[in-house]
Image (cartoon, rainbow, N blue to C red):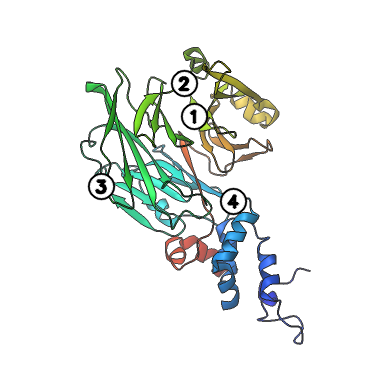
Amino acid sequence: SPIPMDELAGGRRRHADSPPLPDDMLAEILLLLPPEPIHLFRTSFVSKRWRGLVHDARFLRRFREFHGGTPPMLGFFNNHPRSPLFVPTSGGFAASTAAKMSHDDWWALHCRHGHALLQNRRTGAILVWDLVTGDQRHLPLPTRAQEWSCNGAVLCAAGHADHGDCRSCPFLVAYVFSRERNSVTSACTYSSETGVWSELTSIVLPFASVDVKPMALVGNTLYCLLDNYNILEFDLDNHRLGLAQKFPRDAIGSYHDHIVIMPTEDGRLGLAGVEGLNLHLWSLMASIDGLVTWTHERVIDLENFLAPEVVAATFNFWVEPIGFAEDAGVIFIYVHPSVYMIHLKSMQIEEVPEKGNYSSILPYTSFYAPGTAIVSNVVHFTLIWSAL
């Protein structure tokens, strides 16, 4: 039978004369724990010795490397007013503060590498939030952006490469907004190092404004859907706005106007749409002569993966792509009232337990972050531990 964790720690050993495991051997065993934060969090309560091991920066770096440097997905934000703002997808994780936040007050804009970006719908103030540690940074709204339709993204500052540990590095917030009556769309960035917004860069886009669907980062360029289904590109290096190659309008129509933009595995701009029960994946490619076009990369027959009763439900409800988790390579598909996570590499499919109403969703991923903040801000962790 498995040895309980406290026996391994040497607190209550099975044999009084057997010595505790050396630290290096114990660390090798702890590397095998699943990557969800709850496991290292529980481990840290076994003893002071174990806590010291799992809080050690070298161990945490090895732990991230062992799990491929890809943080686990813990849940997602959902902006539909008749559903919870945050839906956990990982057992043992529930952001208690998010559970109390109201759709009347908050709108989720973006999630990346342990940070979530939200905007207060009443005041316009912007929040950068680490759900695992509870750390929050409140930013003022950029000048002249109060009345405009908007979108945004939170990113690591330039030069940061270890995306398994982004908490200690400076961050950048990109904010894009437009005003229909003067046909101008503008963008700016906020640096956590300087604490100020950059100067605006603008582009004239008649009869188009920023859409609220999730943005996509490819290289150092952000892409944002417009409400006329053009795609705005924000070059962060040169601080310049432009338009990406337009996606065919007839294809968008066949997807009932429900599309998701996303980065592809090989570092290009991609797009997903569903026609009937076929998931279509596209990418923006340059040909030998330099012509940039949208290329049909892959078609996935969802009927092979969805249960018969779900397939039957598609006669009454459209199948919609509503989100993409870049780190996990997971696309989210909605068939009312259920959300399904399709792992594009393994083609495994999981149903999200929480049924309801969903629109565009923003997946949240993060590794464990040691410290006392996790105890006070993620109350559910403590409740689970005390019940064991």
| Residue type, mark 3 in image | Pro
Report crowding for label 1: few under 14, some 14 to 19, many 20 or more residues within 10 A (C-alpha). Answer: many
Residue behind mark 4: 69
Marks 2 and 3: in contact by CB < 8 Å? no
N-terminal of the pair, mark 4 or mark 1, is 4
Looking at the rendered image, the disc whose residue lies closer to the viewer, 3 or 2, is 3
Whether residue 214 is visible: no
Disc 4: CA contacts within 10 A as few (<14), some (14-19) or many (>=20): some
Closest to the camera, between mark 1 and mark 2, is 1
The type of residue carrying mark 1 is Ile
Residue depicted at x 66% and y 62%: 31
Residue topped by disc 3: 140
Report x, y in % for residue 294: 54, 19
Tag 4: amino acid: Gly
Real-space CA distance between mark 4 and mark 1, rounded to the nearest whole angstrom: 23 Å
Q: Earlier in the sequence, mark 2 or mark 4?
A: 4
Q: Which label's residue is closer to the chain start, 4 or 3?
A: 4
Q: CA distance from mark 2 to mark 4?
A: 35 Å
Secondary structure under badge 3? loop
The answer to the question of whether label 4 and label 3 lie on touching residues, with beta carbons closer than 8 A, is no
State which quarter of the image contains the C terminus.
bottom right
Whether residue 186 appears in this view of the structure is yes
Q: CA distance from mark 1 to mark 2?
A: 12 Å
Check disc 2 and give the amino acid type: Asp
Image point (59%, 33%), residue name? 266
**Where does residue 290 sit, x and y in percent of width and height?**
53, 18
Q: Is residue 200 left or right of residue 72?
A: left
Disc 1 versus disc 3: distance between alpha carbons?
28 Å
Instruction: Give the mark toward the camera: 4 or 1.
Output: 4
Of 87 and 292, nearer the camera is 292
Residue at image position (55%, 68%) is 56
Judging by the rendered image, the residue that carries numbered circle 1 is: 261
